[in-house]
């Protein structure tokens, strides 16, 4: 006889708070990667020559576009970070209690 399998498919799918925690964590990861990429794009743009900055474009976006995209992704990142902390408050509190004793 092989290993036992769950009898219902519902037990294989995450639901409730677990699903929200996973979505928040994944969104946090994606927004961090996006903001970091935009930050790198803004880091390599020309600063000293206004004419060069006016012509500068990277992957189809000008400097203003990269800046706005970076700002939006950072706001999303902080909102998801707050949500992530709220959803994992019990785990965080337990960790801090255990560490204090």
Image (cartoon, helix red, strand yellow):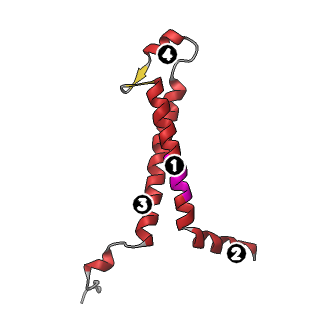
Query: Camera-side residue: 4 or 46?
Result: 46
Dot 2 surroundings within 10 Å: few (below 14), some, or many (20 or more)? few
Report the mark closest to the observer, 1 or 2. Answer: 1
> Pointer 3 and pointer 2: residues touching (CB < 8 Å)?
no
Residue drawn 62% across and 69% down? 92
Question: In the image, is residue 81 part of the stretch drawn in magenta?
Answer: yes
Q: Residue at image x 54%, y 27%?
A: 43
Q: Which of marks 1 and 2 is nearer the N terminus?
A: 1
Decide which of tag 3 and tag 1 comes sooner along the chain.
3
Return the residue at label 4. Answer: 53
Residue 23 is left or right of residue 7, and the answer is right
Which of the image's four quarters has the N terminus? bottom left
Give the secondary structure at mark 1. Answer: helix
Label whose residue precedes the other's in the sequence (4 or 3): 3
- Residue at image point 55% right, 11% down: 49
Is 33 displayed left or right of 4 in the figure? right
- Secondary structure at badge 3 equals helix
Which residue bears the numbered disc 1?
A: 77
Q: What stretch is highlighted in magenta?
A: 76-82
Which image quadrant for residue 22? Answer: bottom left
The answer to whether mark 1 and mark 2 are in CB contact below 8 A is: no
Spatial CA distance of label 3 from label 1 is 13 Å
Label 2, on which residue? 97
Quadrant of the drawing holding the C terminus: bottom right
Mark sitting earlier along the chain (4/1): 4
What's the distance in space between the residues labelled 4 and 1, CA to CA?
28 Å
Mark 3 neighbour class, 10 Å CA radius: few under 14, some 14 to 19, many 20 or more: some
Which of discs 4 and 2 lies nearer the camera? The answer is 4
Q: Residue 60 carries which label?
A: none
Magenta stretch encompasses residue 19: no
**Residue that numbered label 3 is attached to:** 23
Asked whether the beta carbons under mark 4 and mark 2 sit within 8 Å of each other, the answer is no
């Amino acid at each position: 006889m092989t290993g036992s399998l769950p009898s219902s498919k519902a037990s294989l799918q995450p639901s409730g708070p677990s699903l929200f925690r996973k979505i928040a964590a994944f969104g946090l990861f994606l927004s961090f990667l996006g903001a970091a990429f935009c930050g790198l794009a803004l880091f390599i743009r020309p600063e000293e020559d206004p004419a060069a900055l006016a012509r500068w474009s990277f992957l189809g976006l000008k400097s203003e576009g990269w800046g706005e995209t970076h700002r939006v992704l950072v706001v999303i990142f902080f909102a998801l970070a707050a949500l992530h902390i709220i959803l994992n408050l019990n785990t965080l509190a337990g960790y801090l209690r255990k560490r204090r004793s």
